[in-house]
Image (cartoon, grey):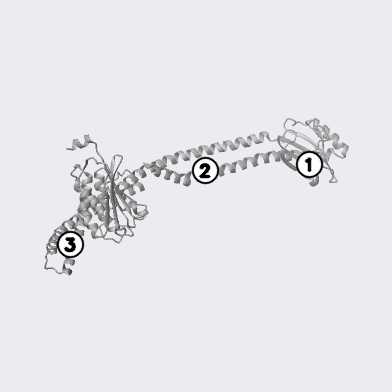
Amino acid sequence: MNPELSRGLRRRWVRGSVLIVAAAIAVVIFAFAVFFYSYYYSTVRTGLEAKAKTATDFFSNYVAKSSSEYYDSAYRYTETFNDADKLELQFMDTDSRLMISSLGITAGTQALSTDVRQAVDTGRIAVWIGRRALTNERVMAVSAPMVYSDGQVIGVMRYLTSLRVVDRQVAMSILTVTGIGAIIMLLVVSINLLFIRSVIAPVGEITQMSRRIADGSYGIQIDSRYQDEMGEMVDAINEMSLRIAHAEKMKTEFISSISHELRTPLTAITGWGETLIYNEKLDADTAGGISIILKEARRLTKMVEDLLEFTRMEDGRFTLNIEPLDLSAELEDAIFTYRELFHQDALELFYRPCPEELPMIPGDPNRLKQVFLNIFDNAAKYGREGKRIDISVETRGDFIAVIIRDFGPGVPEDELENVKMKFYKGSNSKERGSGIGLAVCDEILKYHGGRLELENASGGGLRVTVWLPMTNTATLNSML
């Protein structure tokens, strides 16, 4: 399976599924946290407010008829306070000073919170939540004003309770909800992982087979084991593969048939042209016309030969006659064959042989000569503006490198990788041709265990490097 495909699908799954579920669970947890916080705190507050209101109403109606009665009653009420283990009961004066406390705190301590002052000013119960200065503990304070019958506030009854237990209950509830959310998220991730794996495996297989089809393995079929949309896609790709294979076969047969049909008239045209060109009775114009006919006939003949080579490669009839050969001698023979054509195109040829003696290598001399002639032909057509062709031979590691460089415009960088493709012609090319010369060269070199490398040279022009592997003496002797 392609790792990049797997990572890509998983990223889409995370963005499109997991993140959304995680966000939804986070929102639910936050909502529950707010609910628990409000519920527990409002419950404590409501209970304290009810307790404070009941007590202050009793004091106002039946006990506190004067300031002295208020203080005496407050003292006695504090002494008999039954909830001292849960709450702290305080009686404050109107200046927020502590008068009496169920904990026995020294009277006169100033309350720094706002609830006492608010209760005195408004005549209503006030609530404050914060940290107690003495212990730094979170507490809730409920202050209820003690009101005379004439509406005058003579003091404040104040209940304080620690929020430690409430905070613990809120935290435990939030942790419980968070744990449930984590379990749900784990289940969602596990289920989705199983699903994504069930998708990635067939997609990876289909992608691999599709790439083989794209690379030229037309007609291969993907094993269809699916009854859903995946199965429909597999069936569509299989049908496409068969149709491409059929179309390729028809194209190859057509090219082969046309090429064979063209060879006979081209042979006749070339033969009669060569016969007529040596007729001394021809005038200059006629001789020039016949020369053009011969040149074009040879160009068409070469194109036909390339097409025939291409069809042989396509249908598996391409063969090599491997024998030990001297690569330098084969290259120099090709240079001698093409030197006159270079001269006719006003191109200077500079050849630099390898400074060291090259070993004999295994290869098909005719095929390799075909490679060199095709590259020379390209250099002459596309590099004639530079008026120069450089050819050199080097040894690099276990390979022999034959370098042919022209000084023409070169090839756009984004098209370099396509130049060796069958029937490809560059966007800036104005030359005529079939576009399969370099494709044939590339295939021939692959059969030899070598490769064809193209790159733009610094200073302009295209550099073509033919890489051929060297073989040691033992291997070479086994071929003889």
Mark sitting on residue 213: none
Position in image of residue 93 (x %, y %) = 83, 39
Which circle's residue, 1 or 2, is located before the other in the chain?
2
Q: Secondary structure at mark 3?
A: helix
Residue 404 vertical position relative to residue 176 in the rendered view, above or below? below
- How far is mark 1 from mark 3, CA to CA? 117 Å
| Residue at image mark 1 | 116
Q: Nearer the viewer, mark 1 or mark 3?
A: 3
The residue drawn where x is 22% and y is 35% is 473
Q: Which residue is mark 3?
A: 294
Residue extending farthest front: 355
- The residue nearer to you, when weighing 441 against 340, is 340
Q: Residues within 10 Å of mark 3 (few under 14, many from 20)?
A: many
Identify residue type, mark 1.
Val
- For residue 60, side relative to residue 389 (left or right): right
**Circle 2: element type:** helix
Asked if residue 243 can be seen in this view, the reply is: no
Is residue 3 placed above or below 273 in the rendered structure? above
Q: Which residue is located at x 55 percent, y 43 percent?
A: 26
**Amino acid type, residue under disc 2 in the picture:** Ala
Mark nearer the N terminus (1 vs 3): 1
Question: Looking at the picture, does residue 207 appear above or below residue 388?
Answer: above
- Sequence-first disc among 3 and 2: 2
Query: How dense is the environment of label 1, judged by Cα within 10 Å: few (below 14), some, or many (20 and up)?
Result: many
User: Dot 2 corresponds to which residue?
Assistant: 22
Q: Of discs 3 and 2, which sits in the foreground?
A: 3
Residue 127 appearing in the image:
yes
Q: Position of residue 410 (x, y in %)?
A: 34, 55
